[in-house]
């Protein structure tokens, strides 16, 4: 297996929606996450032109995806390309996705393989809004009890600091468990210890306290 194939094989296993195209704009990789997100099987898209599969539009409904894609050209020439929003048909509806692109180089730029990474724009916005609302709610909680703890008396372990950072990112117990490779029970024990050390009663209050006292 050559290096490009090995790279594609690793990419295919990522927990992100990823597809890749060859120099002729034909789809050569369509991973499981992409199948789920765009509701299309790999067998139905492999070998087809990517612009025919996606039918991408911009925010105003203008046709965006087409042959000789200028964005793909930029990526092949290793010019910086910021992620952008693409409206794609999913079933009978259309949805917005953030698209990031990078190339797997070949001996000539025109022969590079282009990798596309998709993220559901609405889900990302909803997730960010949820975190912002949660933080706002936490700030409105009565936090008078926090003053009882002096900064220099707080001694969190390295693992507790890691868990606290994950909480600040809005991660769930399961997500923290996977990221830190520990059991959910252990995560809950760490959270309990954090709440006790910070003298707060909720995870949200712990996050607010941590931000106010530069603990994370």
Image (cartoon, rainbow, N blue to C red):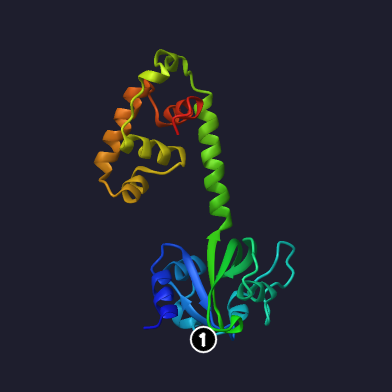
Residue at image mark 1: 47
Q: Position of residue 130 (x, y in %)?
A: 52, 41
Instruction: Look at the picture and state if 167 lies above or below 60.
Output: above
Q: Quadrant of the N terminus?
A: bottom left
- Would you identify the image quadrant in which residue 96 lies? bottom right
Q: What is the secondary structure assignment of the residue under circle 1?
A: loop
- Left or right of 32: which side holds 66? right
State the residue in front, 22 or 171.
Answer: 22
- Left or right of 34: which side holds 158? left
- Would you identify the image quadrant in which residue 21 lies? bottom right
Q: How many marks?
A: 1
Q: Quadrant of the C terminus?
A: top left
Callout 1 crowding tier (Cα within 10 Å): few <14, some 14–19, many ≥20: some
Instruction: Look at the picture and state if 179 lies above or below 93.
Output: above
- Left or right of 207: which side holds 65? right
Residue at (39, 36) in percent of width and height: 164
Residue at (49, 69) in percent of width and height: 18
Q: Position of residue 182 (x, y in %)?
A: 26, 46
């Amino acid at each position: 297996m050559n290096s490009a194939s090995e790279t594609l094989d690793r990419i295919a296993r990522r927990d992100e929606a990823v597809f890749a195209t060859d120099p002729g704009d034909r789809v050569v990789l369509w991973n499981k996450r992409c199948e789920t997100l765009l509701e299309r099987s790999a067998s139905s898209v492999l070998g087809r032109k990517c612009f025919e599969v996606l039918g991408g539009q911009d925010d105003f409904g203008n046709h965006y995806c087409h042959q000789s894609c200028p964005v793909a050209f930029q990526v092949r020439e290793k010019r910086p390309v910021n992620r952008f929003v693409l409206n794609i048909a999913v079933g009978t509806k259309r949805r917005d996705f953030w698209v990031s692109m990078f190339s797997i180089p070949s001996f000539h730029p025109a022969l590079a393989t282009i990798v596309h990474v998709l993220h559901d724009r609405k889900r990302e916005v909803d997730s960010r809004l949820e975190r912002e609302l949660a933080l706002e709610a936490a700030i409105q909680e009565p936090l008078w009890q926090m003053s009882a703890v002096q900064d220099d008396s707080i001694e969190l372990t390295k693992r507790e600091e890691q868990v606290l950072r994950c909480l600040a990112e809005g991660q769930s117990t399961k997500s923290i468990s996977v990221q830190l490779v520990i059991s959910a029970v252990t995560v809950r024990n760490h959270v309990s210890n954090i709440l006790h050390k910070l003298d707060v009663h909720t995870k949200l209050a712990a996050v607010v306290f941590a931000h106010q006292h530069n603990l994370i």
